[in-house]
Image: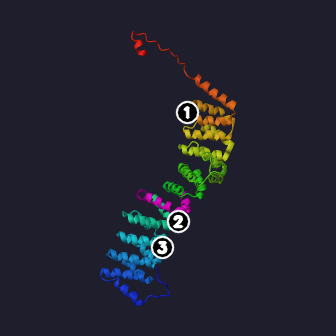
Amino acid sequence: MAVAESTPIPEADLNRWLTQLRSNDVTLRSDAAHQLGKLGDERAVPALVEALSDSDEYVRKSAVTALRRIGGPAAMEGLRQALADRSEQVVLQAVNGLRDMRDREAVEPLIRVLTRRERSLQLAATDALIRIGADAVGPLMEAFKDRALRRRIGNQIWKILVDMGTKSIDPLLQMLTDENQYVRLTAISVLGRIGDRRVAAPLVHLFLDDPRMQEAVVTTLARLEERKVIEPPGSHAADREIFLPKDVVDGFLGRPREEVTKVLTEGLENPSAKVRRFALKSIYALFGETALDHLVAALQDEDIDVKRLAIKILGKMRNKRVIDPLLQLILHDGEQVEEAAWNTLKVLTDLREYDELRARVAKERAGGRPAVRKYAKSKDVSPDWWREQD
């Protein structure tokens, strides 16, 4: 930090240390850099920046320390230059200085420091980037476009973005429309880990806009729901399996109905069972009774959990048109969904009707079995049969 203007530095002192900084003696040069830092006069910055090219590591380290103390734009430029130094200690001092100054211009060179082998430098650069905050998000996400960088420091970048917390949310939301899929997937994952209800609607919009991102979006929304960042309306909070969080519903309602219907209908054919379950739940939440045909069709889904969800939702709709499809499901799918189907049928019928349905299923099952003839076991009449009676 520079000395206040009310206490001017004597010209003689400044010149003495500037002259000593050019000494042939390493110790004198290092001490001069240290003293110039204590003076805090910005006029010393050019000489200290030049000292960053000194052949001696300790002189360079002292120059970096001095630049940290003086501060200002010119000093920050010198510290950014020092990030490329071969010495671990010199770079460490420079990283910490830029961290304290929160220099947004240092983001890209700090990302390069992440690739260094020294653990201390990786940790220091991580801390610096976290403190710089939102201004670092864009360059960090750009690194994911480089395959080599993605493999080398991808996990570190992910952690940095998560540790930034809510500071990174707005720039990450902008990344949801990036053309690079690795950038979009990383943004989705980080937003889910940070946890903020503001991300629900943008994630829903991404679900509608990009089928390739649907599974990642559904996974992230589920994580937010598990952490109770987003929740169903109060009256439905106890049954998360069926009802969508209000923030998710609002995200769908912000788009044209025809578009939402088309995408969700296509979502019922998605290869991911997770996406199909989400689409089914969304269709019911948005369209209510008019979703009946989609729910009945979902009874034929190959995934047991999709079938169970459809069965449970049908119980909420209380429409007796579904009784026969449920009976057929019981007869053909057996134990896998039988309990859920009978529970729904119990809701849809009175006791007499329910018992009649039970009897009907039992009769159809019995009628479908081949007759088995039973033979009485013949009595053993061998001479020693009586010995076995004891």
**How far separated are the C-alphas under marks 1 and 3?**
65 Å
In the rendering, at what x and y percent does residue 271 appear?
Answer: 53, 43
Vertical placement of residue 147 versus 35, above or below: above
Q: Which residue is mark 1?
A: 335
Say the numbered circle drawn on residue 134: 2
Q: Does label 1 or label 3 sit earlier along the sequence?
A: 3
**How far separated are the C-alphas under marks 2 and 3?**
15 Å
Vertical placement of residue 338 versus 380, above or below: below
Q: Residue at x 49, y 67 (%)?
A: 131
Mark 2, Cα crowd under 10 Å, few <14 / some 14-19 / many 20+, is: many
In the rendering, at what x and y percent does residue 26 appear?
Answer: 31, 79
**How far separated are the C-alphas under marks 2 and 1?**
53 Å
Q: Residue at x 42, y 89 (%)?
A: 11
Camera sees residue 120:
yes
- The amino acid type of the residue labelled 1 equals Glu
Camera sees residue 149:
no
Figure quadrant of residue 153: bottom left
- Which of label 1 and label 3 is nearer to you? 1
In the rendering, at what x and y percent does residue 39 appear?
Answer: 42, 84
Q: Main secondary structure of the magenta part?
A: helix
Q: Secondary structure at mark 3?
A: helix
Over which residues does the magenta segment extend? 147-176
